[in-house]
Amino acid sequence: MKAYLLLVVLTFLSAPAAAANERYYREDGTEIRYYLDNAEAENLLVIFQGSDCNNVRHMKSVNTIWEAFDTDSALLTIEKYGIDDSLAYASGERDDCPADYLKHDTMAQRIKDGVQLIEALRPSYREITLAGGSEGGSIAIGVAAQTPNLHAVLALNSGSSSFQHDVEFSIQQTVPTEQLDEVLNGFRQLVKQVKESNEPFPIEVSGHGYAFWKDALARDLLQPLREIDAPVLVMQSADDESVDPERTRQEVKKIIAGGAKNVTLKMMPGLDHGFRDSSGASRLREQIEYAAAAVKTKSSSSAIPFLKAK
C-alpha cells in the first residue's frame, strides 16, 4: 500500500505543467481557441460564458467569478466556435456575429470542446472545478456529466430543463401586454419550423443560428444533473426574468429527491438574472464567495452544504 501511495505521489509531482500555447483541434480540423491564465497553479477553474455573441475575454463576469471563487487557481476559458479575440465587445443584439459562429455554434459543440480541453489539461491539475452562468451553467453541467472526478460544479441561473419554456417565460415577463400574443405566436411558429425541419435554413435570432436552435430546443438541460458524480451547486435567482425560477426550483428538487444527493439547490431571493438586486447593485461577487466557502467545507464526495445565506 505504501509503495502504491508513493507511486501516486511521484506521478502527481512529475505531471507536466499545462502549456497555455498548446493547440487543440476539433474533428472538422478547426482550432479550439482557449485561454489559460495562471497556468502554473495547482488547481484549475473552468468558466463557461453565457449565450451572447462575444469574445470571452470581454466578459467581466468571468473575471469576477474567478476573483471571488479562487484567484489563485488557473483559469480556463474557451471561445465559442467561430469567435476569437478580434471580435469587439457589444451588448445586446448585434449584426456582426461571425458566419462560422452562426453556422456551427451549438450547446453540443461547446460541451464537446470543453470535455476535450479538460481531459487534455487534467494531468496538470490536482482539482478541477467547473462554473458557468445562464447558458454557461448548462454547458458546465453538460461537460460535468461527461467528465469524471471533478472537484465541484457551479451552475448559475441556468434555468429549467426546457429551453423553449424559459424563452417563453422571458417573453411573458418582458414584452408589453399588447404585443405579447403576437410575439409568443411568432416565437412558437419559429420553434415549430425548426423542430420539424430536416434541412438547415437561414435564421439569426438572439445572436444564434439554425444549428444552435435545433440543438437547444431538443435538449433536456437538467438531465445531466442525474449523471454527474461530482458535487453540484445550482444557484438560481428568484427574481430571474430570463429563465423560469419556480419551474427550475421544482425540477431540481425533483432530481435531488430522485437520488441526485450530490446536487444542492440555493435559491437567491431578490436577485435577477444578472445577480442584481432591486436597486440595481450587483451581488455576483458575494454569491460566488458564498459558493467558494461552501465548496471548501464539503467533504471529498459529499454534496455542497448550505452555509448561512448571504
Image (cartoon, helix red, strand yellow):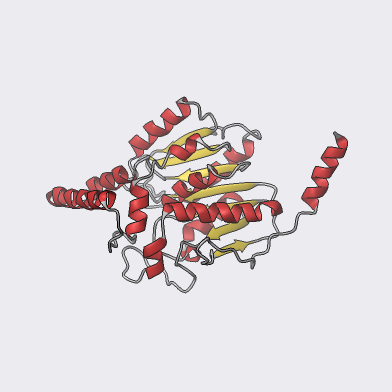
Rendering coords of residue 140 (x, y %): 50, 48
Rendering coords of residue 124 (x, y %): 70, 54
Is residue 273 found left or right of 20 in the rendered image?
left
Q: Is residue 273 above or below residue 252?
A: below
Q: Is residue 42 above or below residue 297?
A: below
Rendering coords of residue 13 (x, y %): 80, 51
Residue at the spot x=58%, y=58% of the render?
76
Residue lying at the far front of the rendered structure = 198
Give the image quarter of residue 89: bottom left
Rendering coords of residue 164 (x, y %): 30, 45
Whether residue 32 can be seen here? yes
Residue lying at the far right of the rendered structure = 3
Residue at the spot x=52%, y=56% of the render?
113
Is residue 189 found left or right of 102 in the rendered image?
left
For this rendering, which residue is in front, 237 or 209? Answer: 209
Residue lying at the far left of the rendered structure = 178
Residue at the spot x=51%, y=57% of the render?
62
Is residue 117 found left or right of 203 in the rendered image?
right
Q: Is residue 209 above or below residue 280?
A: below
